[in-house]
Image: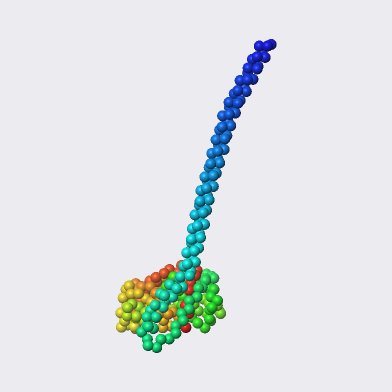
Amino acid sequence: MRQKSILATTFLLVLIALFYKNHHILTEKVLNFSNDVKLTFITQKENLLNALSIHFNQKRQIEELQQKIKELEPKASLSVAFASKLNHLLKETDLKTYHPQLYPVQVLGYEHMQDVNRLWIEFPSFKKEKIYGLIYQGFTAGIIRNEAERPLAILQSGKESLFSVFIGKNNIQGIAFGAGETIQIRYIPSYANPQVDDEVITSGNDNIFYEGIKVGRVINVEKKDMYKIATVKPYISLKQAQFFYAVEVK
């Protein structure tokens, strides 16, 4: 009986020893796993914080640049638009006061969904009796006119957009009409000689634009019975444009 008691005690001690040994190993593994999880969490947290910091810094920088662009774009557009006119004025002996006006305008939506060239715009300073020039990134974009007592922008790719222009170094006169992806310059005198790659600018003769705003370059010239037609590739694409500048000639 005593021998059985000794064996039972020995067996119990062995079990206890094995338990503590395995418990130590198990505890060590659990702690290691926990430490790995913590380390992974801390690393991911730091990476996320760094990514967020970079994102917000970039967002702030983008916002600052956008603000600077917003401040500088009117000045840039004005300098492009009026440089030619001012050069002419400097040659005159009887200079007149010149007050160029440029207004930021925003697209509200299409007049009709089937015509992407006609856009309602927000234009608080709009005067119903006037036709305004439309500028985008310093280049011509179309015209603004009264439609149902509201300002309607007609992009220069639309058929109803027309304004007067000069072609090339000799300032050949013509009228720009929208023609989809291109612009057609019509009513060019038959004796004039426009050339492919000639630059086209606004003439200022229509009181829509000032002289000197760039339109595009000639890519083809066609001769008709009484006049010539020049096809022009515009300098800019107006797809998805949401903000423009309206030009008021006084």
Camera-side residue: 89 or 182?
89
Against 50, is 194 above or below?
below
Where is 16 relative to 211, above or below?
A: above
Q: In which quarter of the image is residue 157?
A: bottom left
Q: In which quarter of the image is the N terminus?
A: top right
Residue found at x 62% / y 23%: 16
Q: Where is residue 236 in the image (x, y as percent from the top left)?
A: 41, 69
Residue at the location (35% across, 74% down)?
199
Residue 222 x/y as whole percent: 33, 76
What residue lies at 47% left-to-right and 77% top-to-bottom? 247
* Colour mode of the rendering: rainbow
**Looking at the picture, how far across and down is residue 93, in whole percent?**
37, 88
For the question of whether residue 165 can be seen, the reply is no
Which one is in front, 172 or 211?
211
Residue at the image position 56 percent from the left and 32 percent from the top = 28
**Residue 34 versus residue 145: which sits nearer the camera?**
34
Number of marks in picture: 0
- Spot occupied by residue 131 in the image (x, y as percentages of width and height): 48, 80
Q: Please determine whether, in this image, residue 19 is positioned above or below residue 9.
A: below
Residue 189, can we see it? Answer: yes
Q: In which quarter of the image is residue 168?
A: bottom left
Picture quadrant of residue 41: top right
- For the view shown, which residue lies furthest in the right direction? 1
